[in-house]
Image (cartoon, rainbow, N blue to C red):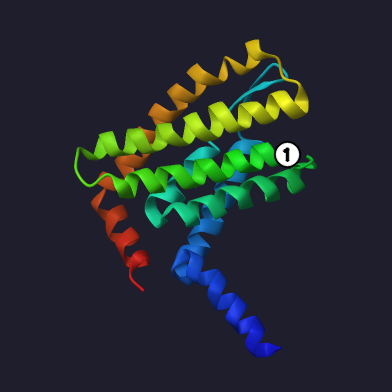
């Protein structure tokens, strides 16, 4: 039994590449929970403005699409438990998409300006995860009206631009980049 549990732990760490990356992804998931569930701006009953996706996007861009997807799913599920919400599979799938697509696109772009790579990566997360998948979940499960869903488009365009600038600023910081490279070394 002991050997089997050791193999399971190793395979879980392999998803992240190292224990350091796994711990940082857990911290980013915790940041996402705090930003999304506790530090947000609510406008009415159905519109909420937050930067909960920023840590998930960072996990994806810094550590890859799988690490980002796991971070997104973890943040959504744990956040639901903490706030007493029922888990909506569409919303969780949206969080997984938000974690997966930025890392995939960021790593696929071989050439081009850094800001263009980041903007494309971040906006892909919001278009697929926030504007499409999560909106379908809000309409299907909570019967959110389309006029409320339509507000998600301009909100996530603005949030995406702000998040792109934030990640770009971090990646241009030499001290941050040096620490990130230390974490990435195995």
The answer to which of 153 and 139 lies nearer the viewer is: 139
Number of other residues with Cα within 10 Å of mark 1, as a class: few under 14, some 14 to 19, many 20 or more: some
Percent of width and height locating residue 181: 30, 62
Residue topped by disc 1: 88
Q: Residue at x 36, y 43 (%)?
A: 105
- Which quadrant holds the N terminus? bottom right
**Residue furthest toward the top?**
147
Q: How many marks?
A: 1
Percent of width and height locating residue 21: 45, 64
Q: Residue at x 59, y 51 (%)?
A: 30
- Which quadrant holds the C terminus? bottom left
For residue 101, side relative to residue 26 (left or right): left
Percent of width and height locating residue 26: 56, 58
Percent of width and height locating residue 84: 80, 42
The answer to which of 14 and 167 lies nearer the viewer is: 14
Q: Residue at x 41, y 43 (%)?
A: 102
The answer to which of 152 and 107 lies nearer the viewer is: 107
Q: Does residue 40 appear in this view? A: no
Q: Is residue 38 above or below residue 63?
A: above
Q: Is residue 41 above or below residue 12?
A: above
Label 1: element kind:
loop
Q: Does residue 33 appear in this view? A: yes
Q: Is residue 148 above or below residue 12?
A: above
């Amino acid at each position: 039994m002991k050997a089997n549990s050791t193999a399971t732990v190793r395979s879980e760490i392999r998803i992240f590449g190292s224990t350091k990356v796994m711990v940082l992804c857990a911290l980013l998931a915790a940041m996402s929970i705090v930003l999304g569930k506790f530090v947000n701006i609510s406008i009415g009953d159905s519109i909420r403005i937050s930067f909960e996706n920023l840590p998930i996007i960072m996990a994806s861009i810094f550590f890859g699409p799988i690490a980002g997807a796991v971070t997104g799913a973890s943040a959504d599920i744990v956040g639901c438990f903490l706030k007493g919400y029922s888990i909506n599979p569409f919303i969780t799938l949206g969080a997984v998409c938000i974690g997966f697509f930025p890392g995939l696109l960021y790593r696929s772009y071989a050439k081009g300006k850094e800001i263009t790579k980041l903007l494309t990566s971040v906006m892909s997360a919001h278009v697929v995860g926030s504007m499409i998948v999560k909106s379908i979940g809000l309409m299907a499960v909570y019967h959110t009206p389309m006029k409320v869903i339509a507000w998600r488009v301009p909100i996530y365009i603005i949030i995406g631009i702000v998040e792109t600038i934030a990640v770009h600023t971090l990646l241009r910081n030499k001290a941050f980049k040096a620490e990130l490279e230390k974490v990435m070394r195995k």
